[in-house]
Image (cartoon, rainbow, N blue to C red):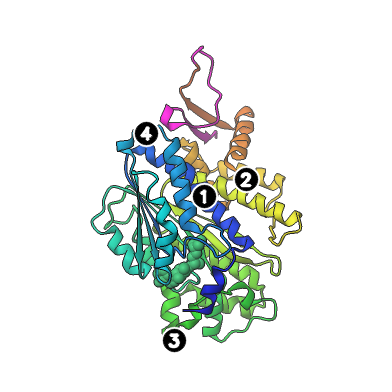
Amino acid sequence: MAQGNAEFFAKKREWSLVKDALLRCYLAPYFMKILCTGRPLIYVDCFAGKGKFDDGNSGSPIIALETFQEVLQKSTVQPQKKSIEAYFVELDYPDELKKNLEPYHKHDPSLKIFVNPGNYEEQILRILHGKKGMNLFLYLDPYGVKHLDLEFLGSFSSNSGNRKFRSTEFLLNFNSHGFLRVACQFLKIDFPNEVSWEYLTEYDNSLDIPQNKTEKMLNRVAGGDYWKDMVRHYYDENKRFYDLEEDFTQEYCKQLRKYYSYVLNIPIRVKESHSPKYRMIYATNHPDGAVLMADNIYKRKGEMHEMQLRGQQILFGLDYDNHNIKEVVKNYLLTVNKLQRLNLVKANFFNIYGVFCNSSEFSNMCKTLEKNGDLEVIRNPATTESGKSSIFWAEKESEGRTIELRWKN
Ligand SMILES: C[S@@+](CC[C@H](N)C(=O)[O-])C[C@H]1O[C@@H](n2cnc3c(N)ncnc32)[C@H](O)[C@@H]1O
């Protein structure tokens, strides 16, 4: 077992708190929505860990189980219609994990908990074998990138022909530095001192791969060999490594969009470097999920900013100022020339430009454009109970409240 492994679970690091919050704050509203569909949820934590850190902090399995239990208690859906199976795959610590999850088995009969000792690649196929029509959520938090075959990840998509899932989403901890570190080593390229590899990739095991298998592994992970030209170009042109990491991540997300309609990411930055420590990447085919996650990402970005202001270690760079955001949103809306559901418009915006505002700020910008006569907005219901024109900007599909909009020519 790698030494980093034991070290990892000794103490929860501050940047992991952002990762945990991202998971917790998405799972609660996501699961609430899924319960209303009456279809089962299969949740798989593919690199589950021990369940608990040695300092007493909860790991991702306990975070998820506590969230599920809270939602199950609050939900008004009939008990027989509630169903969730939570699987926890772990290679090195299955016994500790089992022990740490024992108290959670008793809580709610709708929640079934399984620990799967072994490799993620094998276990996930076993777990999903013969399953149809359910909602699938995968959480992937490996040390490095070597297990992350992009095509394999794509094969779980509800858009993929051989799968019969109602919906698939995943949240992935993608160690872009780990990838680029191995790529640079393979290409024999040495970026100048600006990169603190050790710091950025402390628990990475991707370097354990034999040299003759490295190229294949990198191609599998990246979903192509575009990374070679990218790394060479940045090196030859004397460009910044930080920009390479950003561009590489964007290209990686583009590859994932072959399988998932919406792919969002949040960089988790740490003080010693302005480059992200890692990226949390989220993929879905559902616009509502994308908007939910965009709001979550935006909140987490704000929290990181606060942490920095309080002198803690995480850095956050604002990418657009307020004026620019308005311009970017307006220019994007100019392209919406056919009526489209508001959530679809928002999800596409976050997918193309990234998360630089939240969905209610986006709605407020639309509101101003509607007042100025630039946007046509069709609301259902069009009038209130007292017969006045509807002016709401929040969709509630479950109550039949929807919004469509387009730019007026
Ligand atoms: C970064 S840790 C996960 C931490 C966990 N998400 C948490 O919040 O506590 C990665 C875990 O993956 C496990 N692991 C390593 N290779 C694996 C594989 N091929 N399949 C499943 N688990 C693996 C390691 O033993 C380790 O516990």
Q: Is residue 270 depicted above or below 408 in this figure?
A: below
Comes first in the chain, label 2 or label 3? 3
Please check the rendered image and state whether residue 408 is part of the magenta-colored stretch, yes or no. Answer: yes
Task: Name the residue rendered at 31%, 51% in the picture.
Answer: 165
Magenta region, residue range = 385-409
Q: Amino acid at mark 3?
A: Pro
- Mark 1 lies on a secondary structure that is helix
Please check the rendered image and state whether residue 105 is part of the magenta-colored stretch, yes or no. Answer: no
Comes first in the chain, label 3 or label 1? 1
Q: Which residue is mark 1?
A: 24
Q: Are marks 4 and 2 in contact (CB under 8 Å)?
A: no
Q: Amino acid at mark 4?
A: Val
Q: Nearer the viewer, residue 141 or 80?
A: 80
Q: Nearer the viewer, mark 3 or mark 4?
A: 4
Circle number at residue 77:
4
Ligand 1 contact, mark 1 (Cβ < 8 Å): no
| Residue 2 on image: x %, y % | 49, 79
Q: Nearer the viewer, residue 8 or 324?
A: 8
